[in-house]
Structure formats: C-alpha cells, structure tokens
Image: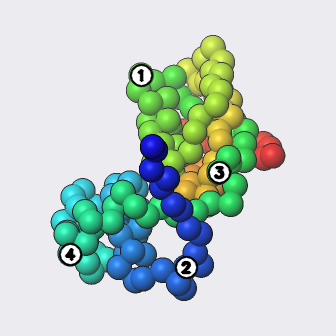
C-alpha cells in the first residue's frame, strides 16, 4: 500500500521562524549570494542541523507556477563569449529562456531577440535588464512586450 504524503498550505505568519529561515538560506544559496551552507545559515541565524533537517520539506508557494513571458531586444558587439555573459545574467535571475534569435552582425554589432519566461523568483525584471546592460559590450537592452 502506497503511503500518502500530506501537504499543507499555511500563511507565513503561521510558519515557525526556523522554517522561514531555512527558506531564506536556500534562497541565498540559489542566488549565489553565499557560497556555502555555513555562510547561508550564519547569515540567517540558524544552525546547520536545522537547515539540513528541514531543507527538503519547505518551499515557497507561488500562486502562478508558470511565469509570464517577456520579449527583449539587445544590441551587442560581435565578440566571442558575449552572448554567454548575457545568458548568464538571465540565469542569475532564475528566468527561463524560451527562444533566442541573433542576427548576422553588421559592422561588428548584432541584434539579439529573446523570449524569456520570468517567475516570482526572478524578482524585478527591470533589474534583470539593467544587469544585462551592465555587461561590457552591450549597447542597450529593451523590453518590447510582456504577457
């Protein structure tokens, strides 16, 4: 006989503080703000044993599991590795790339069109755009549409 795994949905105020700190520590690790579990648990003020005890049992709940899609246009220099840096900046924001189209470079400059699925974990899409624009060799990044 298969054992049922019960799940509950609780308001944040009903969740014990240690569990909320486990979620925060996991977020710090996932975002790259901390490099080790020890750094993450020190930052949020819990023990490593508490983290390991609960890390597989608590997750943030997002009302819409599927994100929204944005379309971006980016103008960039034709340099090896630059597209990889752009994709890395998007990955840092936990967004999912759906389509990529890069034009043939003209006079050393290419246009890139991206469709990106963004989620609550992505955070501020405008901040993601600014992060892309801060990459050396990017002329501009524009968000054309969002659905």
Q: Decide if residue 16 is on the left or right side of residue 101.
A: left
Between residues 146 and 25, which one lies in front from this camera angle?
25
Mark 4 secondary-structure assignment: loop
Mark 2 secondary-structure assignment: helix
Q: Residue at x 47, y 61 (%)?
A: 59
Mark 2 vs mark 4: which is more N-terminal? 2
Q: Residue at x 49, y 35 (%)?
A: 87
Residue 80 disc label = 1
Q: Which residue is mark 2?
A: 12
Q: Is residue 135 visible?
A: no
Vertical comparison of 37 with 14: above or below: above
Please state the horizontal and vertical placement of residue 110, each as a whole percent of the image: 61, 24
C-beta proximity under 8 Å, tags 4 and 3: no
Measure how far apart labels 4 and 1 are at the Cα level.
44 Å
- Residue density around tag 4, few if under 14, some if 14–19, many if 20 or more, within 10 Å: some
Between residues 77 and 56, which one lies in front from this camera angle?
56
Residue reaching furthest to the front = 1
Q: Which residue is mark 4?
A: 47
Measure how far apart labels 4 and 3 are at the Cα level.
30 Å
Mark 1 secondary-structure assignment: loop
């Amino acid at each position: 006989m298969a054992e049922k795994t019960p799940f509950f949905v609780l308001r944040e105020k009903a969740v014990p503080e240690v569990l909320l700190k486990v979620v925060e520590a996991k977020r710090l690790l996932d975002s790259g703000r901390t490099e080790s579990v020890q750094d993450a648990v020190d930052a949020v003020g819990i023990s490593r044993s508490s983290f390991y005890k609960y890390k597989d049992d608590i997750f943030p709940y997002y009302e819409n599991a599927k994100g929204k899609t944005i379309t971006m246009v980016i103008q960039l220099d034709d340099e090896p590795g630059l597209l990889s840096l752009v994709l890395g900046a998007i990955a840092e924001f936990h967004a999912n790339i759906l389509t990529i189209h890069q034009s043939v470079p003209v006079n050393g400059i290419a246009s890139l069109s991206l469709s990106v699925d963004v989620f609550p974990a992505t955070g501020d899409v405008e901040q993601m755009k600014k992060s892309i624009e801060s990459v050396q060799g990017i002329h501009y990044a524009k968000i054309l549409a969002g659905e």
